[in-house]
Amino acid sequence: MDTGNTVTRVEHIGIAVRSLADSIPLYEKLLGTRCYAVEEVADQEVKTALFRVGETKIELLESTDPEGPIARFILKRGEGIHHIALAVPDVKSALASLSVQGIKPIDTVPRPGAEGMSIAFLHPASTGSVLLELCAKS
């Protein structure tokens, strides 16, 4: 694999939920840990709640807009796993490397994500029907 898109770990698993208020207590019970951060990412029309599970995180996603991407996802598929985020050293380099290898991006340039991360999504048509997110500390 080209070092431009070497994955260092699973950064988080994104789970679409209707309500953070209802889901946070459930996931605190399920995971045996407390939610450590709630953050709104306005340009993605989402509010997130984060849990640490070893070196990986669980990210609950609640839509802040009834027409937003998470609301549409839940309407079509119901609550559940929305995406898997992969940590890479540099999102821009990973996008370039994967594009050369025929992987279609959703985002052609990195954008800001939760926790100050630089992120970009890859199109499920190129990734075996799984929405993948690339993440790197900004």
Image (cartoon, helix red, strand yellow):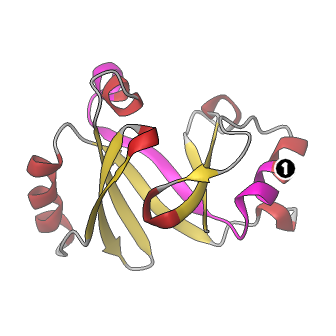
Specify whether residue 27 is in view: yes
Region of the chain picked out in magenta, as a range: 74-95
Under mark 1, the amino acid is Ala
User: Does 84 lie within the magenta span?
Assistant: yes
- Residue 81: percent from the left, percent from the top? 37, 44
Which residue does the image show at 24% across and 41% down from the upper left?
Answer: 17
Position of the N terminus by quadrant: bottom right
Position of the C terminus by quadrant: bottom right
Which quadrant of the figure has residue 72? top left
Residue wearing tag 1? 96
- Residue 75: percent from the left, percent from the top? 29, 21
- Residue 116: percent from the left, percent from the top? 50, 65
Which structural element holds mark 1? helix
Which quadrant of the figure has residue 31? bottom left
Count of picture labels: 1
Which quadrant of the figure has residue 38? bottom left
Query: Mark 1 packing: few (<14 Cα in 10 Å), some, or many (20+)?
Result: some
- Is the residue 108 above or below the residue 95 in the image? above
Which residue does the image show at 83% across and 63% down from the upper left?
Answer: 4
Give whichever of 1, 62 is nearer the camera.
62
